[in-house]
Amino acid sequence: MKRAFVTGWPIKHSKSPILHGHWLDHLQIEGSYEAIAVEPEKFSSFMKELPSSGFKGGNVTIPHKEMAYKLVDELDEAAKAIGAVNTIHIENGKLAGSNTDAYGFAANLDSECPAWRSTDTALVLGAGGASRAIIHALKQSGFSKIIIANRTLQRAEDLAVEFGETCRAVPMGDGMHVDASLLKDIGLVVNTTSLGMNDANSDLALKVEQLPNQAIVTDIVYTPLETPLLKAAKSAGLETVDGLGMLLHQAVPGFELWFDKRPKVTPQLRETVLKTL
Ligand code: ATR
């Protein structure tokens, strides 16, 4: 039996066992996907024991993604650029680390709003770990102007330096406030901050009505599914894409690595995960 895992601390809120379990059932694969809680102090011994554990590989989530990046034997290009590993594949006793978050982000937009590829100017709200994956995806997709807005300007500036000249850092005020003069050329807005998480009614100071009519607005937060940002964007008549699809799509490459079958993101899978939110 092929076995895979997800590890984090805590791990009980992870949706990964539900979605991989759904695929294992539907594809009738004899396999397992187990949630394993590993304390930060024990993570490096967990990684050391992996090659002889019988696992094909697994997912790594908060707070271990950056540590996994340091501990694997090999990194794919996305993991290198993002500085974090969310997917591990064990091959010939070696740990291969990849990062599928940027892929998941792009695949979700490709599926929900393919027009995103016709724009080249993005506003990314936030400058944390999640923001790195989004900026990498945008660069890979050929975006030529990426504005990174963050409460702590220095973090946005550091990211802009690291990701190169297509990026520019600007300050973000309360309620995602960004200087309105920056909004008129934006084709895609992505929220990567935790603002609006578990708070559908939090105040929004971002003037979405100043965005171009064709702008697309997406949020990587999916609790609630309709965040204050998405709600405001919808009311302003803009195209919106929620964050649940990124979670579903980022899981596809890992499943294929461990279980040798490429699974599909279907409305049924989305329903199954949605029911547990
Ligand atoms: P993640 O890996 O999920 O991106 P993170 O590295 O802690 O987590 O980054 C969280 C992001 O959300 C940061 O951009 C953070 O802004 P700061 O760099 O200024 O801390 C942003 N964030 C979190 N809570 C926020 C709040 N109440 N207001 C504004 N930004 C917030």
Image (cartoon, rainbow, N blue to C red):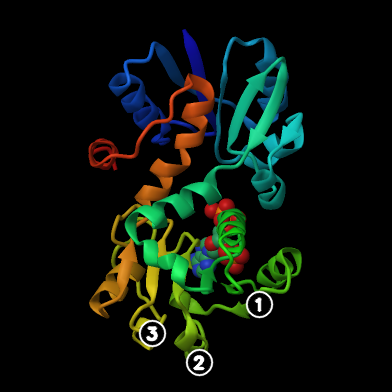
Q: Quadrant of ligand 1?
A: bottom right
- What is the residue that sits farthest to the bottom in this orientation? 181
Give the structural element (helix, strand or loop) at label 2: helix
Residue located 55% across and 78% down the image: 172
Residue matched to label 1: 168
Task: Give the residue at mark 2.
Answer: 181
49 with respect to 6 (left or right): right
Contact flag, marks 2 and 3 (Cβ < 8 Å): no
In the rendered image of this protein, does residue 133 appear above or below residue 18?
below
| N-term-proximal mark, 1 vs 2 | 1
Give the x, y percent position of residue 260: 48, 21
| Sequence-wise first label, 3 or 1 | 1
Vertical comparison of 217 with 110: above or below: below
At mark 3, the secondary structure is loop
Gap in angstroms between the C-alphas marked 1 and 2: 14 Å
Q: Is residue 118 left or right of residue 127?
A: left
Element type at marker 1? strand
Which amino acid, by three-letter code, is at mark 1?
Arg
Q: Is residue 211 above or below residue 74?
A: below
Q: Amino acid at mark 2?
A: Ser
Q: What is the x, y in percent for residue 155? A: 68, 67
Foreground label between 3 and 1: 3
* Residue position marked by numbered label 3 in the rendering: 212
Q: Disc 1 beta carbon < 8 A from ligand 1?
A: no
Dot 1 crowding, Cα within 10 Å, few <14, some 14–19, many 20+: some
